[in-house]
Image: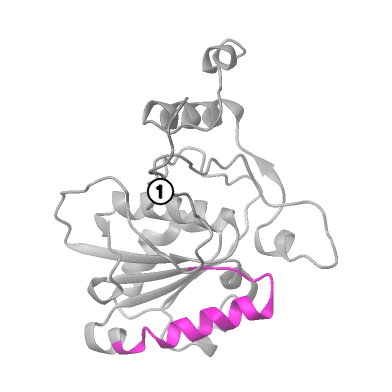
Amino acid sequence: MLALQDKVHNETKQGEAFAPIALDNNKYQKYFYIESYGCAMNFSDSEIVASILQIEGFGATKNFEEADLILINTCSIREKAELTIRKRLTEFRATKRKNGTLIGVLGCMAERLKAKLLEEEKLVDLVVGPDAYRSLPNLIEEAETGQKGVNVLLSRDETYADIAPVRLDSNGVCAFVSIMRGCNNMCSFCVVPFTRGRERSRDAYSIVLEAQDLFNKGYRIGSFNFSLIKSSF
């Protein structure tokens, strides 16, 4: 049985700054800083964003003052959640003024408010919805020339299944494996269908490959016979 006494698992620390758990000795010319708020899906999406940015030559940092790009992955489930984001943005103002740091708002709040967010929060350079993270490199490039960037298009088929997440500040025991996105239930009290789009699932084989990769890296949650799954494909 796996001993877990030295492991701590707490993915619910709202606004915690994430950086990869694996020791990264690479020297990067550019660094990004990302905070996540809200549900587990947002924390998982931040790992997708980290992977996209790493391919573009960005390294992660837990110090926003040394970042070239500050991102907040947001929640829009309640008004209080959005007020928390707005308050946090004001705390980045001095850093932006001093270093010219780019600031982006991701996730559900970005999707709900769209370009209106740029009007209300003048220091924001990028507004990117949950289905548009692949466009981040182009939007960043445009923002570096002084243009504001917005992409909040929802997709009926985007699942990011082909992107290997960069596991951020994990405990090495638990990890997020996303199997679907969006929702088709139009509940009167819920914004998810409007901020995350229609329900769609990843192909099963990509899920198994990701789970197998985590297992090979030492992640252990319960028991799972991967050979049985492989034999079904």
The chief SS type of the magenta part is helix
Q: Residue at x 44, y 29 (%)?
A: 2
How far across and how far down the image is residue 12, in percent? Answer: 54, 59
Q: Is residue 100 left or right of residue 199?
A: left
Q: Is residue 75 left or right of residue 23?
A: right
Q: Is residue 122 magenta?
A: no
Could you tell me the amino acid type at mark 1? Ser
Find disc 1 in the rendering and name its residue: 170
Q: Is residue 129 left or right of residue 191?
A: left
Quarter residue 214 falls in: top left
Q: Nearer the viewer, residue 111 or 67?
A: 67
- Mark 1: few, some, or many residues within 10 Å (few <14, many ≥20)? many
Q: Residue at x 26, y 71 (%)?
A: 68
How far across and how far down the image is residue 180, in percent? Answer: 64, 43
Q: How many marks?
A: 1
How far across and how far down the image is residue 139, in percent? Answer: 40, 66
Quarter residue 113 falls in: bottom right
Q: Nearer the viewer, residue 217 or 157?
A: 217
Q: Residue at x 37, y 54 (%)?
A: 50
Q: Nearer the viewer, residue 226 or 68?
A: 226
Q: Is residue 92 magenta?
A: yes
How far across and how far down the image is residue 118, in percent? Answer: 50, 83
Quarter residue 64 falls in: bottom left
Q: Residue at x 35, y 74 (%)?
A: 143
Extent of the magenta region: 73-94
